[in-house]
Amino acid sequence: MKLCYVCLLLFLFAGRAAVGADQAVVSPVLSPTPSPSGTGGAAKESATTFPRYGDTGVYHVNNETRPSKNRQKDACVARRGDVVTIYVKHLKAWLNDPRNQDRFPKDAKVTDLIPFLDDVPLTGIHPEQNWAEPADVDSVEIPQVHYLRFTLERTETSKEQWTRILNHPRFTKPMKVSVGFENGEEITTYVLPTAAKTENRFIFTLIPPFRFWLGVAIILGAFIVFLSLARWTDIIRDTTAPLRPDKRWPYSLSRTQMAFWFFLVLAAFFFLWVIIGATDTLNTSVLGLIGISASTTVASVFVDSGRAPATPSQSDLPAVDLSQPRRKICLEICALIDEAKKDLKKLEQNRGAIDPHAEALLAANAEAQTLKKGQIDDLERQLDYFRRPAWKGVMYDLLTEKNEDKKVVVEFHRFQILIWTIVLGIMFVANVYNQLAMPQFSATLLGLLGISAGTYVGLKIPDSEQAKTS
């Protein structure tokens, strides 16, 4: 009987020990939190639980340059050039895990780590400072937390990686944050773009708003001033060409092309400076484009300098008040056309009453009818001009020449250089936005643009010679 009691007591004791062991395994482990100063110190217990190695990796990021009001709850918002602290749990266990040794660099240590943004390794950026809380241990009971401080700067070795991170820029972008080695091995992270908790999110500012909008205001203001000058002055007009019906010179294709590349390169240069902070973004292709457009303008001015100044005749300019809106100008020209047609009809009626033998009177009547028909043609040409939208008038200036019959003819060499300029401009903008770099056009493509420009200038020479002899 005593033996039965002893067995029962041993059974109860073993069951109690087993229950105690289970409770020890599932009991929560208190995680240490960094000291307020961010420089280490004694660990403080937190109510947050971190289950053993299932929670290994990066779990939080702080911005030391622009700290938030509540660093433990707010998402970390940073930009290029900021100093951030990345919190990693069980880092030493990950480094010392035998299963990882074949994938790590030889003699890998904490100071060899680099930050990863969206799985892109920022090579050459190593921890400026690293410390651990609590002591340098990593056990089941006390998960070690490392704090790694990095400066997110664009170095010579990380230029290509920053381009991969910042391309297709928008103002802000949630990113995955981790640390690892330059060979691509990185530790698990809980700082993900889709993280449910705010404190586990890292939001990167690709375009600094203040700097961006200040630059936009400056460039846009300069462009508005240029458009005003282009409309009311002769800054990009061809002052050797015949006057338009509105008593203004037409726009010059070569000067317009030069202004186009100037503003495009200026905007791209500023955009790249805002995004990547570089001022050495110009390349030989950009210099070639600017050089071709400038050479085209100089050559055009040289050719046009030999042309006799255009003297507008009365038939070129409408006898109406041009300060009025276009609608009223068209109404007045229509009235002049109706009046001229009535005069022509009277001349035709008077011719029937003239003696067939009065040759002088018949010749005078025929000459008057010819002049009146010419006046009607001039008025209809002027009416056609003022009925066009303003943008269409600019396109006619860039694409057309006025021949000896005062007819507007679209020239293919003008059309060719305009289309090539637009196509290369679209490629230029797409490359700057997608690759964050000025495009590298091949010598063949630049040569093709140069041939188009040379053709444009070459075909202006016969027009200049013809103007001298006329």
Image: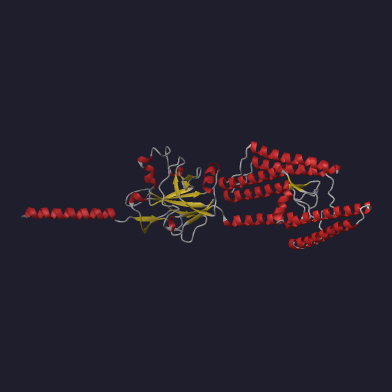
Q: Is residue 37 left or right of residue 360?
A: left
Q: Is residue 330 left or right of residue 50?
A: right
Closer to us: 357 or 415 = 357
Q: Residue at x 89, y 58 (%)?
A: 353
Count the labels in the image. 0
- Quadrant assignment for the C terminus: top right
Q: Residue at x 67, y 38 (%)?
A: 448
Give the image location of residue 70, x and y in percent. 46, 61
Q: Is residue 179 left or right of residue 454?
A: left
Closer to us: 236 or 379 = 379
Give the image location of residue 152, x and y in percent. 52, 49
Whether residue 177 is visible: yes
Say if 104 sits above or below 373 in the image: above
Closer to us: 372 or 121 = 372
Q: Specify the color scheme.
A: secondary structure
Whether residue 315 is visible: no
Give the image location of residue 157, x and y in percent. 53, 41
Say if 284 sits above or below 29 in the image: above
- Quadrant assignment for the N terminus: bottom left
Closer to us: 448 or 1 = 448
Give the image location of residue 159, x and y in percent. 55, 43
